[in-house]
Image (spheres, rainbow, N blue to C red):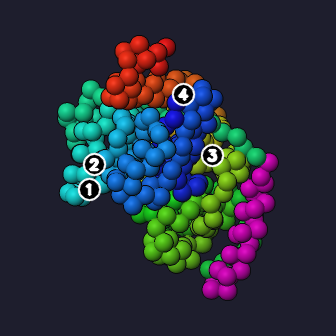
Amino acid sequence: MKILFLASLTTETGNFSTADRLRRCLTDYDIACCLRCVTSFEDSESVNKFVKTDGFQCAIGIHAWRAGRLLLDCPVPFAIIFGGTDLNEYDRDKEKFETMTKAIRKAKYLVAFSSSMKNQAVVLWPDCEEKIILQPQAVCVEPSGFLFHDYCKQVIDAQRQHQISNGFLSHKHSGLTVFLLVAGLRRVKDPLYLAESISEWHKDDNSIHLVIVGPELDTEFAREIKSKVQRFPGVYIFPPLPACDLHAAMQSCFAVVNSSTSEGMASALLESMALGVPVLARIIPGNSAVIKHKETGILYNSPEEFITLAKELKKSPQLRNYITTNAKKYIGEHHSVEKETKTYKWLVKKLISLQRQQSGSTFEESREILT
């Protein structure tokens, strides 16, 4: 079985981790997955030629716009996994919405990570409900021996010299209480949403830091926030880390935060919960789908509320232990790799069965692929 997996494959992003995890899991079942970045193709015609030339039997794309527009002329059955911004951001653009609609209607199956994503898809495309599969993202964490606190101190001390010269800081840090924001630098992630409030807290308690880690996905925006962050003592932007080092960083920080204006299902939150690290996330549908307030994490609605809740968490080891214990249990029950693999294995076999029927294979051959 040979399938094309089409997604935005910028490393250290949620789409990449999802696509790579699925590839590795399906490969264990003799399903040959060819990962290709959406930037590798100019248009749907180039994907059509690639599929025919390489003999793919089906295709799966992540994101109804980024991958969907390239699958419009796909000659084999395909499925689309909703990404998040395709449902919450790109739908506002008339031209993109029309293109996504064509892709959604042609897709044989659609995958939503949560009920809220499924409900939003049904609002946008009422006729697609019957082909939506609900499958939460799985979590796979492999922390390395990376010493994040040592790394933090090196980077912060280097940046601190620049800030001291500008009069921002005049004292040494007494330690590190790191709130870690894992996010690609783009507007939808709103990375500086908490910056001013955390910086004010840092002035009172210089152990407090906000560290933003992620790739520059929007060059102009990244340049803009790197300039702005200089005004906020205690707030730092670090370059992206390999997944295993990032998981180690999560384990070393006080809490992982999310401040996005839109999410499908944030991988960093799930990974943190699996690692036993508290999460504090902005109240949006994608975050509320996986976090129950003060049960499996903390939800906040403003920077001011974030500070109040973060201080409460810092003062209460009991609350921290309660939340992290519940979160690990929740991840184990609802985000297992085994369940995710089973779903996508079934999906691939259904798509290949349709392809065999489409190409004129016998009924017995089509039936064989499902056994």
Type of the residue with mark 2: Met
Disc on the earlier residue, 1 or 4: 1
Check disc 4 and report the residue beneath it: 341
Q: State the extent of the magenta-drawn residues as a range.
A: 145-167
User: Which tag, 4 or 3, sits closer to the chain's start?
Assistant: 3
Q: Which mark is residue 315?
A: 3
Main SS of residues in magenta: helix
Name the secondary structure under disc 3: helix
Mark nearer the N terminus (2 vs 4): 2
Q: Is residue 48 magenta?
A: no
Q: Is residue 204 visible?
A: no
Magenta region includes residue 153:
yes
Q: Which residue is mark 2?
A: 100
- The reply to whether dot 2 and dot 4 touch (C-beta < 8 Å) is no
Q: Marks 3/1: CA distance?
A: 47 Å
Q: Are marks 1 and 2 in contact (CB under 8 Å)?
A: yes
How much space separates mark 1 and mark 4, taking CA atoms? 31 Å
- Residue type, numbered disc 1: Lys
* Residue picked out by circle 1: 96
